[in-house]
Amino acid sequence: MAPLPKKKRSKARLGPRRAAYRLSVVTLNPCPQCHSPRRPHRLCPVCGYYRGREVIAVESPAGQ
Ligand SMILES: [Zn+2]
């Protein structure tokens, strides 16, 4: 037989685990190209640059 929990976990005891399900605050770092807030390891939505080169074309380039 597979191991099973001996007792049903009460709603109060589920609380500490469910406290980890909350949303984390989004971190924002300045873009090295245009210095606008940008999420780390993502290309900048303002200038479209990532790792020193233009990856996507932005309609209104603000970083130039
Ligand atoms: Zn940028």
Image: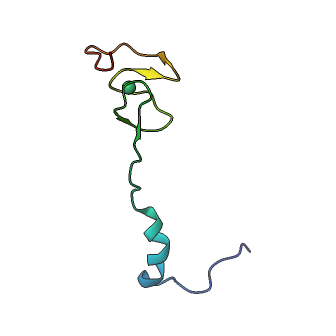
Residue depicted at x 45% and y 70%: 18
User: In what quadrant of the picture does the N terminus appear?
Assistant: bottom right
Residue depicted at x 36% and y 21%: 47
11 and 26: which is toward the camera? 26
Q: Quadrant holding ligand 1? A: top left
To which quarter of the image does residue 24 belong?
A: bottom left
Name above or below for residue 7 compared with residue 17: below
Q: Position of residue 9 (x, y in %)?
A: 51, 82
Q: Position of residue 28 (x, y in %)?
A: 39, 43
User: In what quadrant of the picture does the C terminus appear?
Assistant: top left
What is the number of callouts on the image? 0
Q: Position of residue 6 (x, y in %)?
A: 62, 85
64 sits left or right of 13 in the view: left
Name above or below for residue 49 compared with residue 42: above
> Residue most toward the left?
60
8 and 20: which is toward the camera? 20
Residue depicted at x 72% and y 72%: 2
1 and 40: which is toward the camera? 40
To which quarter of the image does residue 11 belong?
A: bottom left
Residue depicted at x 44% and y 62%: 21
> Residue most toward the right?
1
Q: Position of residue 37 (x, y in %)?
A: 35, 37
> What sort of colour scheme is used for the picture?
rainbow
> Residue most toward the bottom?
7
